[in-house]
Amino acid sequence: MRLIVDHVTRYSYDQPVRGVVQSHRLTPTVFEGQTVVDWQVTVTDGCPGGVFRDGAGDRVQAWSVAGPVSEIVVHVKGVVETRDLTGVLRGHREIVRPEVYLRETTPTWADAALIELSSAADDASGPLDAAHRLSGAVADAIAYAPGTTEAHTTAAEALAQGKGVCQDHAHALIAMARHRGIPARYVSGYLFADAEGQPHEAAHAWAELWIVGLGWVGFDPANRCCPDERYIRLGSGLDALDAAPIRGIARGPGSETMNVRVVVAPEATQGQTQQ
């Protein structure tokens, strides 16, 4: 499938700031499941800095904007050719050992309720079956409900209230997998929702679990599936903050507001929008 992405992130400040520095993970991952046909990232009045590929195989680009500045627009636009590899991250190069992703973080801390929910994998026939069972348990326990959680909501909090968004599903699955000794990490990217009418987010997130013999395999509890040709992978990390597509800091006393618009569509077809 050939997918078109148009992603705009607008930062506004209630008073001009002296400058802004950002770090971007906004370039699609290099692996057998996707090929970049065309890709551009622009920043209003931005000056590109250093670029490197980190130990997890993600391309990281620095940007700076000299002030005074009241608004910054980050615009991502491109075309990616995708293939369905049944969730397996085949052909991806990285040097970080899977065991690194056994480390707990605050959003992925497994409380008693998450530990109890992870018992869904007790009778699994192997690691892959266990991963599927854990993903299914998360999907059953946390209903997809936009606007019910915040950026800093933890997996334990989302499970306690029984609803959340893709970030919460990913954090919960990661917490449960790590508790059971399965390395797990957070993945950020994009999703094209097809005509089935299932809940979705264009700017999306899911989890990858390390399965011996297969490597990293993606699981998306929010949509009860493994990533396929509808998904575009951008980057990974220990949790949502670590894998954020855009991280940055503004120098100045002003407060910041952010507005995001994402359109993902197959070529020559109207896409979906998230605001």
Image (cartoon, grey):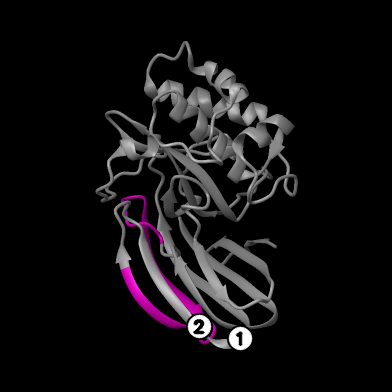
Q: Position of residue 203 (x, y in %)?
A: 58, 56
> How dense is the environment of label 2, judged by Cα within 10 Å: few (below 14), some, or many (20 and up)?
some
Above or below — where is 91 with respect to 59? above
Is there CB contact under 8 Å for labels 1 and 2?
yes
Q: In which quadrant of the rendered image does the N terminus lie?
A: bottom left
Tell me which segment is drawn in magenta: 28-51
Q: Main secondary structure of the magenta part?
A: strand
**Residue behind mark 1:** 69
Q: Position of residue 24 (x, y in %)?
A: 45, 66
Rendered residue at 51%/71% (across/down): 76
Mark 1 to mark 2: distance in Å?
8 Å
**Residue behind mark 2:** 65
Rendered residue at 51%/43% (across/down): 206
* Residue type at numbered disc 2: Val
Q: Secondary structure at mark 2?
A: strand
* Residue type at numbered disc 1: Val
Q: In which quadrant of the rendered image does the C terminus lie?
A: bottom right
Residue 222 sits in quarter: top right
